Amino acid sequence: MPEHAVKPVFELIVVNQVHLKIVNERVTRHGDYRKGPSGKHEITVNASLNKYRFLITLIHEIAHLVAFEKYGRNIKPHGDEWKLTFQRMMVPFIRPEIFPNQLLPLLAKHFRNPKASSDTDAKLAIALKQFDQKETDKNYIFEIPMGSPANSGNNNSGYSLNVVLSWAKNMNKTISDIINNLLKNGKLDKAEFQQATTLALEVYLQCGQDDFEDEGLESFKSFIFNDKLMNELCIYGAFEENKLIGIMGTKNEGKHISLFFIKKEFHRKGIGKQLFDYSQYDCPANEITVNSSTYAIRFYESLGFEKTNDRQQTNGISYTPMKLISNK
């Protein structure tokens, strides 16, 4: 186990009255939790795991214990209650004193929505495997050598440490800032787009009344409910305890913001700025345009955007064209 994790882990074991057993390697699982007939909390972890996977596995199993004790025994083993518990318990360990720098961004991304097994997170599983002390014949189906025909095209290899550190330097952020941001923000899957459109319409109706008439509202709906148009966007989401509270949709490789909505109760809490920073980390652009609502002009100005024209109207929607030149 990483040296700086020993004390806080020991405290978790004592507080939760865990009986921990280190056992021989089991092929089907890294660890296991059960409550014995006497009421004793028993956790087993494979002795063959490297120290980083050992830590993740142990916290994973303690999170089962804590979730069952807090929410009852009828919850799903890897349901939302466990995910939230695991995330909250693991976040304090995701820091450079405990994990190598190359693992930090991958861990941060993984723990935004933790899976039942870290082995199902391809990028994290491969990264963790590099720290195994002995050669293993266990290979993952997603391990494809760089340069092979199957790995042609876009290189979605995840978060490069150099990119993350460069982003930190340029944005004047610390590693902790990055980790917290990655945990709270992320790129949405197509399956999550329905949540995004619902949120966009809700906030548009609450905050955009000064910018649309009946025609404009119908124009906006025809855009967000058009699957073809929405699928052309790269949509980022801001989350609070795994609930979507804000979205930002960009197109043209991040050069134009098409959608940017934060739930009203979360306004003025820095969430929009964090989401914008995340999008710039994921897909940096030197120039970004946006057609701002009246309500959002001050927000965009706080990001460095400037008006490029007077208020205009198209298809019943009023807006103010603005532009950000990042190297200005």
Image: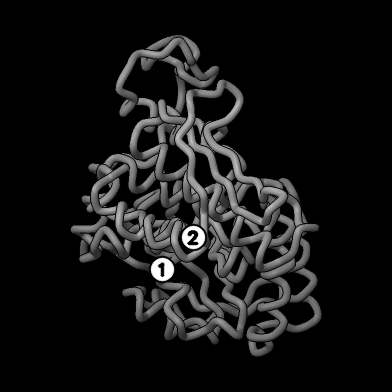
* Pointer 1 local density, CA inside 10 Å: few below 14, some 14–19, many at least 20: some
What's the residue at 27%, 62% (across, down)?
326
* Pointer 2 local density, CA inside 10 Å: few below 14, some 14–19, many at least 20: many
Is residue 9 depicted above or below 205 in this figure? above
What's the residue at 47%, 74% (across, down)?
271
User: In which quadrant of the rendered image does the C terminus lie?
Assistant: bottom left
The residue that mark 2 highlights is 185
Type of amino acid under label 2: Asn
Residue 251 appears anywhere in the view: no
What's the residue at 63%, 56% (across, down)?
82
Type of amino acid under label 1: Gln
Q: From this viewpoint, which residue is outermost toward the bottom?
A: 210
For residue 259, which quarter of the picture? bottom right
Q: Which circle marks residue 274 in the picture?
A: 1
Q: Is residue 228 left or right of residue 147?
A: right
- Estimate the spatial distance between the alpha carbons at disc 1 and disc 2, rounded to whole Å: 8 Å
User: In which quadrant of the rendered image does the N terminus lie?
Assistant: top left
Is residue 126 depicted above or below 205 in this figure? above
Q: Position of residue 181 (x, y in %)?
A: 40, 62
What SS does tag 2 mark?
Answer: strand
Q: Position of residue 69 (x, y in %)?
A: 66, 64
Is residue 326 depicted above or below 216 in this figure? above
* Disc with the residue nearer the chain's start (1 vs 2): 2
Q: Is residue 156 left or right of residue 40?
A: left
Q: Position of residue 257 (x, y in %)?
A: 50, 62
Badge count: 2
Q: Position of residue 235 (x, y in %)?
A: 57, 55
State if disc 2 and disc 1 touch (CB < 8 Å). yes
What SS does tag 1 mark?
Answer: helix
What's the residue at 31%, 28% (across, down)?
131
